[in-house]
């Protein structure tokens, strides 16, 4: 009897140890996913000019409200989101008072979609355009924590509270080194507004987008909120060359550049055997351009032979155009095979409308990702599947061992019962 109890205890201990072994990887996954929550604050211009009805036949304010409703519905659960207004409350003509008119409409934190939508629905275009003060307050709203921090500013006009230059405010925020990015969107902007909003974005490594349609506004704000939930990637300013031989060598990352009308940009990336190059490019028309344009991204060898291409076309209904490509380099039997230099060529066919400045060039954003080939275990693990296969194997092994032990124990019990 004592022998039987000891054997049963040993089997239970073994099964418990196997179960504990399986739980460890799960715990590791939980620890790795326990990352600081990203924070985003949407800063909306609610000044009097937002009454203008020039976005698809509706007012700028109506377009902004619709965009906010769609973005709030699609905001990732892990993102802590807040909303701040400027020019929403003071109706008078006192400039000093008008330049204080910025308020926190919804605090940065876990998102209650119904409450946030209700708050946005109450907004009415009212007063001044204190962009600088609003940015300072928004930076305070996002203070604290180790996650990514992003301000998305939507405005239709210049700041009316000089001499507090919002561009200088953005530079001050960037100089604090708190890792806060400001992205700006201009609703049907004039040249001065575009220049100011571009300057604000450039100061913090953000992006500027010219918006003239409701769908564009919803899509772009949604993209920026989603980006906050992505792994932290700091855009790196680079300058493409006129030919591959002089192009900058890039590694995996996010890069910003400017491309002039009628210009090409060249970059180069080293790809080892068995790796895959994934590249994407976006060009923003931050000024009025003629309709019917295209964007081409080519991967070519250093000798000029095309490997693969991605292309897209537009007709003037959008202010940003994007395309991408993938190039899986085959495996090699030679472990010492040298890296292959792949040249990336960006070509666009934008043309400026009459009277529009052609300098500086239009904002260009290039994403480069070099990963293990699609059939390599390292690539599988990189996309979170490696632990899944490991866990499946552990479960199969555990079931097999447990079956053997249970069968042996059952036969032993039958033998004991027959001898008794």
Image (cartoon, helix red, strand yellow):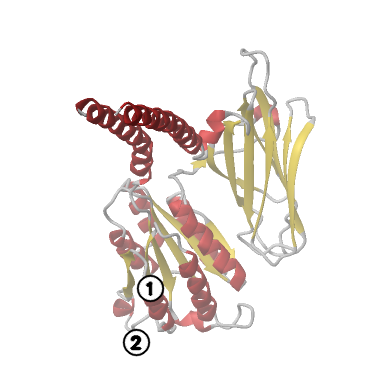
Residue at the spot of label 1: 85
Q: Residue at x 40, y 84 (%)?
A: 122
Left or right: where 363 falls relative to 183: right
- Quarter occupied by residue 81: bottom left
What residue appears at the point 55 percent right and 62 percent down from the top-left corner? 220
Q: Residue furthest right?
A: 305
The one of 226 and 238 positioned closer to us in this rendering: 226
Quarter of the image with the C terminus in it? top left
> Which badge, 1 or 2, is on the more N-terminal residue?
1
User: In the picture shown, does residue 90 fall above or below 251?
Assistant: below
* Mark 1 surroundings: few (<14), some (14-19) or many (≥20) residues within 10 A: many
In this picture, residue 185 sits left or right of residue 109: right
As drawn, 278 above or below 168? above
Residue 401 x/y as whole percent: 42, 29
- Check disc 2 and report the residue beneath it: 92
Q: Is residue 324 above or below residue 198?
A: above
Total tally of numbered discs in the picture:
2
**Residue 85: x %, y % from top left:** 38, 73
Disc 2 crowd, CA 10 A, few/some/many (<14, 14-19, 20+): few
Q: Secondary structure at mark 1?
A: strand
What residue appears at the point 75 percent right and 41 percent down from the top-left corner?
Answer: 309
- Looking at the rendered structure, which numbered label has been put on residue 307? none
**Residue 154 visible in image:** yes
């Amino acid at each position: 009897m004592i022998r039987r109890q000891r054997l049963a205890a040993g089997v239970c201990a073994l099964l418990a140890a196997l179960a504990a072994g399986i739980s460890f990887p799960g715990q590791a996954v939980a620890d790795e996913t326990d990352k600081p929550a990203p924070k985003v604050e949407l800063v909306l211009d609610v000044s009097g000019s937002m009454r203008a009805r020039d976005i698809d036949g509706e007012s700028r304010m109506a377009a902004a409200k619709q965009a906010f409703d769609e973005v709030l519905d699609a905001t990732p659960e892990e993102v802590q989101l807040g909303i701040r207004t400027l020019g929403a409350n003071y109706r008078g003509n006192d400039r000093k008072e008008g330049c204080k008119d910025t308020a926190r409409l919804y605090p940065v934190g876990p998102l209650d979609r119904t409450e946030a939508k209700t708050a946005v629905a109450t907004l009415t275009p009212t007063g001044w355009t204190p962009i600088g003060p609003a940015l300072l307050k928004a930076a305070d709203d996002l203070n604290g924590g180790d996650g990514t921090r992003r301000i998305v500013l939507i405005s239709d006009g210049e700041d009316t509270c000089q001499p507090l230059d919002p561009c200088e405010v953005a530079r001050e925020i960037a100089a604090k080194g708190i890792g806060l990015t400001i992205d700006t969107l201009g609703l049907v902007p004039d040249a001065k507004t575009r220049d100011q909003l571009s300057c604000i974005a450039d100061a913090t490594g953000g992006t500027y987008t010219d918006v003239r349609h409701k769908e564009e506004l919803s899509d772009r704000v949604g993209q920026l909120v989603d980006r906050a939930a992505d792994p932290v990637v700091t855009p790196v300013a680079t300058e493409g060359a006129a030919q591959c031989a002089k192009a900058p060598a890039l590694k995996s990352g996010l890069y910003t550049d400017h491309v002039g009308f009628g210009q090409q940009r060249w970059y180069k990336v080293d790809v080892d055997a068995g790796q895959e190059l994934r590249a994407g490019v976006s060009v923003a028309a931050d000024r009025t351009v003629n309709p019917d344009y295209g964007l081409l991204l080519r991967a070519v060898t250093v000798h000029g032979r095309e490997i693969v291409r991605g292309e897209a076309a537009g007709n003037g209904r959008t202010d940003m155009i994007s395309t991408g490509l993938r190039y899986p380099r085959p495996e090699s039997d030679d472990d010492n095979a040298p890296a292959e230099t792949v040249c990336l060529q960006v070509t666009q066919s934008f043309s400026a409308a009459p009277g529009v400045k052609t300098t500086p060039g239009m904002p260009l954003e290039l994403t480069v990702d070099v990963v293990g080939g699609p059939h390599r275990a390292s690539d599988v693990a990189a996309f979170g599947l490696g632990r899944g296969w490991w866990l499946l194997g552990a479960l199969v092994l555990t079931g097999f061992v447990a079956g053997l032990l249970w069968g042996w124990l059952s036969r032993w019990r039958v033998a004991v019962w027959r001898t008794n």
